Amino acid sequence: MSRGSMLVPLALAFAFALPLSTGQAAAPPAPTVSTGSFSNLTYSSVVLDGSVDPRGQETNYVFQYGTSRGYGTQTPLSPAGNGTTTIKVSQPVTGLQPFTTYHYRIVATSPGGATKGSDRTFTTPKLPLSVAITGVPDPVVFGDAFLVAGTLSGTGSGNHEIALQANPYPYLAGFKTVGNPELTNAAGGFSFPFLGLLESAQLRVVTVGKPEVSSAVVLENVAVRVSFHARSVGRPGFVRLYGTVAPAEVGALVGFQLLRPGHRSVNEGGTSVKAGTATVSSFSRVVRIRRGGVYRALIQVPAGAHVSNYSSPILIR
């Protein structure tokens, strides 16, 4: 081999042995992540878990979540540091809907880029059913109609069959269904019209079928119905005050009150309820009226099947 032919391979070997230019430094590494499990799952919240290796770069992470792989919501940006080992991370999530499947994943970013974890899912549990009710009005005047209104809350509360039950005074017979069951509206609301409640009663609303749920017991009081009138008796300054009470509450005390706006009422005498018919009793008394004005009668009923009540006011001159 000639001497010239030996020079070419040596030159090439020398060229390949030269170091790379410092302007061609390798890019920083992206973080590595792993979407973990979840914990503390309720119908409205969860804690999402995962892991991040920052690989020596300042790294932040979030959990993305939503009802599809499009996610749409994420936790606040949180730091993962700049270490070189894998660390475990977690974030709480609130404001979830009950009985709903959610997708989630962890995403970490650093100067080296962004890395997305695998997609995972969880399903929130059902919100337990509960019932709240009230009687409107309370008390109800004897013979008047009233409503038992309320709301069934929880998963499946809309268009759910419910029933009204009553346990009348003296509250020993137990609850029995009143009328026909109803369906709640789409939002779980309902109202039962109640006609002809003759005595105070305990009321509740229960679900029909499974799950069996009952409202708290409420007491609907029945107030006596009072009529009140006045007529002249031919003596100056005296009038006869009279009226009726239903149902018959023989022996109940009657008070005649002068109403004074902004001040306490003034008692202007009274009497007691006398026997009448089986369903209506009456009262009557001649009273000296010292001051004209607006008067009403108060029927004070002892504790029992009914409660006390006022008459409508009347003007006496």
Image (cartoon, rainbow, N blue to C red):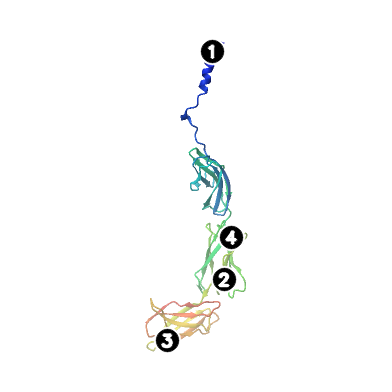
Circle nearer the N terminus (1, 3): 1
Q: Up-down: is 191 above or below 27? A: below
Examine the rendering and report whether any part of residue 152 can be seen: yes
- Camera-near label (1 vs 2) is 1
Query: Observer-nearest residue: 274 or 169?
Result: 169
Element on which disc 4 rests: strand
Tell me which corner region of the image, top left, top right, bottom left or bottom right, holds residue 230. bottom left
Q: Cα distance, mark 1 to mark 3?
A: 146 Å
Q: Nearer the viewer, mark 4 or mark 1?
A: 1
Q: Give the secondary structure at mark 2.
A: strand
Counting residues from the start of the chain, the first of labels 3 and 4 encountered is: 4
- The kind of residue on which mark 3 rests is Val
Numbered tag placed on residue 287 in the rendering: 3
The residue labelled by disc 4 is: 161
Q: Which residue is the site of mark 1?
A: 5
Q: Which of marks 4 and 2 is in front?
A: 2
Q: What residue type is labelled 2?
A: Gln
Task: Measure the C-alpha gap from mark 3 to mark 4.
Answer: 56 Å
The earlier-in-sequence mark between 4 and 1 is 1
Q: Dot 4 surroundings within 10 Å: few (below 14), some, or many (20 or more)?
A: some
Q: Where is residue 200 in the image (x, y as percent from the top left)?
A: 55, 74
Callout 4 touching callout 2 (CB < 8 Å): no
Specify the quadrant that holds the C terminus: bottom left
- Mark pair 1, 2: CA separation: 115 Å
Q: Which amino acid does label 4 sit on?
A: Glu
Q: Are marks 3 and 4 in contact (CB under 8 Å)?
A: no
Direction from residue 268 to residue 43 in the image, left or right? right
Mark earlier in primary sequence (4, 2)? 4
Q: Which kind of residue does numbered mark 1 sit on?
A: Ser
Q: Residue at x 45, y 80 (%)?
A: 297
Q: Which mark is residue 202?
A: 2
Labels 1, 3: front one: 1
